[in-house]
Image (cartoon, helix red, strand yellow):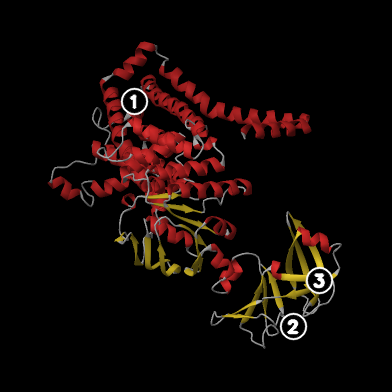
Amino acid sequence: MIVQETTIQAKRLNANSQPFLLKKWLLITIALGFLGIFILVPLIAVFTEGLSKGIELYFAALTEKDALSAIKLTLITAAISIPVNTIFGVVAAWAIAKFNFKGKNILITLIDIPFAVSPVIAGLVFVLLFGSQGLLGPFLEANNIKIIFGVPGIVLATIFVTFPFVVRELLPIMQEQGTEEEQAAITLGASGWQMFFRVTLPNIKWGLLYGVILCNARAMGEFGAVSVVSGHIRGLTNTIPLHVEILYNEYNFSAAFAVASLLALLAIVTLILKSIVEWKTKK
Amino acid sequence: MGITIKEVSKAFGTFAAVKNVNLEIPTGDFVALLGPSGSGKTTLLRMIAGLEGLDSGNIFFDEIDYTYKPIKERNVGFVFQNYALFKHMTIFENIAFGLKVRPRKTRPSKNVIADKVNELLKLVQLDHLATRYPSQLSGGQRQRIALARALAVEPDVLLLDEPFGALDAKVRQELRHWLREIHQKLNITTIFVTHDQEEALEMADTVVVMNQGKIEQIGTPEEVYQKPANAFVYSFLGRVNEFRGSALFEDNEENIGYIRPHEIVLRKILQGNSVSSEVSHIHIIGSTVRFELRRQDTNDLFEAEMSIEQYQNFSPVKKGDILYAEFKNIVVFNTNSANEITLTEKSGIRTSLKSKLI
């Protein structure tokens, strides 16, 4: 089909080649120019600034104690929030795509809330819930459970902000596939788990992976919500983005950009993985 | 395995899909559930498979109550309308699925599974396609694989939902014969759903005609065609001209008369009780010739048929010619009582106000 489309386009091109070519190149130049100024140049700037004081200082900034602890916390946060969101994402998408029930549209709207709401507000919600002045604050303090200004709060805020990625990715795929293959598996004698692992999961695996990649990128890069709940305690409750901010505010530019380059690298890896998955799904 | 359906009803919201249906299917029977869309035939089939729950009534397999039996314990083979093959598995893996998911105790060994799959691939005459994926197959091939997959678990009952609905005419014809052969070979109780009356009459031993959630008639293909129980069955099976109105039968508005196109006798000269009609179209379809005519008395359109041999003796006839049509054996049903009143000698002299081509 792609081949057909390109031949059709080629024909159109030939039909009025001169002005069309001009327009085409003009559009491409504008698009590429825009991308270059707003995305590529900053990306290069991050790396050049990070490396401006030499490669040794670059690695020193990355291996410094507080930086390592920030990296560790970011990885822990991602390691918890991604599996949680994957499981709940699959469950929610499954429920919405394969069953009819009252309140389905409300559920879909609720799933979109993290996208609609500013991350700062999302963070504040958790402070209002679990903070010492909050709804559950006295109870938590009495039982010596610390959520706000601690790792649990950061994880909760990250889960909240990244929840829609997996669901949103899976929902259209699952809706399109319908339920017939699953019903066929059941009539052939498969149990519920066998049906899920042998039929449902293989059918959604690329979409799921795509959702997980996006979810991971956001989980590691999230700033607003995490900033509100973390308390910015160095070496304890700082994630990579928060650590970058602190370094930057201390005018420690080269270290700030060195750590920031980690996130930039993550973005590049994410984009590459994303393209591979897209290419695989199209096949 | 025989199936007994007792007083089964099912509604989707406010829409009653199946209303109080009773049906007895003996072991080894080949049954067609025939009806227009929305008649409840697919719902009934899915209830037998357990894919749909019942609101009331019971379903028995060989006198054992299966009403609340889980799907996977029913041992039915179900062939879906769009085949529902597993896209990510090869043809071989698709057919082996039912055997591979069995609990370890009853699961056959790898070699036994492979033998079984190859045997089934031979049965459906597609053994060369074992390593392909469903997307690489044609519609007819997919249909056969779907059947092989359903047969792999050695089901007691085979259920097919519009098995040939998505195929082109020639492939459909081939597969009809082929499915009949398979049924004769395996002699497994088979129920299929169709809206195509030709398919039902050609393939089934028993035809169950359904309409609006109810069974209108159960019988052999010959019975339902020759002795339709009511107006619906008559008009649904085969082409038919419908005459209704006061002029048909003693000013009774509730009577509807039906006559099949091949029962109308066309002549070039007036003879007996005939109605002069103008030819508005002539179609030659293989061995039959179909006339579209307009009655000159009531200005209604109707359809008549004759064989090509008769037509050759009859010709030349062209559009605009006047022919005399004799309506022998008009069958009249009363819409209220559903009783059949057959007119034999009154042969529609001053018939119908409205005639409709179905």
Q: CA distance from mark 2 to mark 3?
A: 18 Å
Quadrant of res A150: top left
> Do the dots labelled 2 and 1 sit on one chain?
no
Chain where mark 1 sits: A
Q: Nearer the viewer, mark 2 or mark 1?
A: 2
Residue A149 at least partly seen: no
Q: Position of residue A137 (x, y in %)?
A: 20, 48
Q: Amino acid at mark 1?
A: Leu
Q: Are marks 3 and 1 on the same chain?
A: no
Left of A2 or right of it: where is B323? right
Q: Residue at x 28, y 19 (%)?
A: A64
Give the left or right position of residue B63, taking residue B349 as reference: left
Disc 3 target residue: B267
The secondary structure type at the circle numbered 1 is helix
- Rounded to the nearest angstrom, the CA distance separating label 3 from label 1 is 104 Å
Disc tally is 3
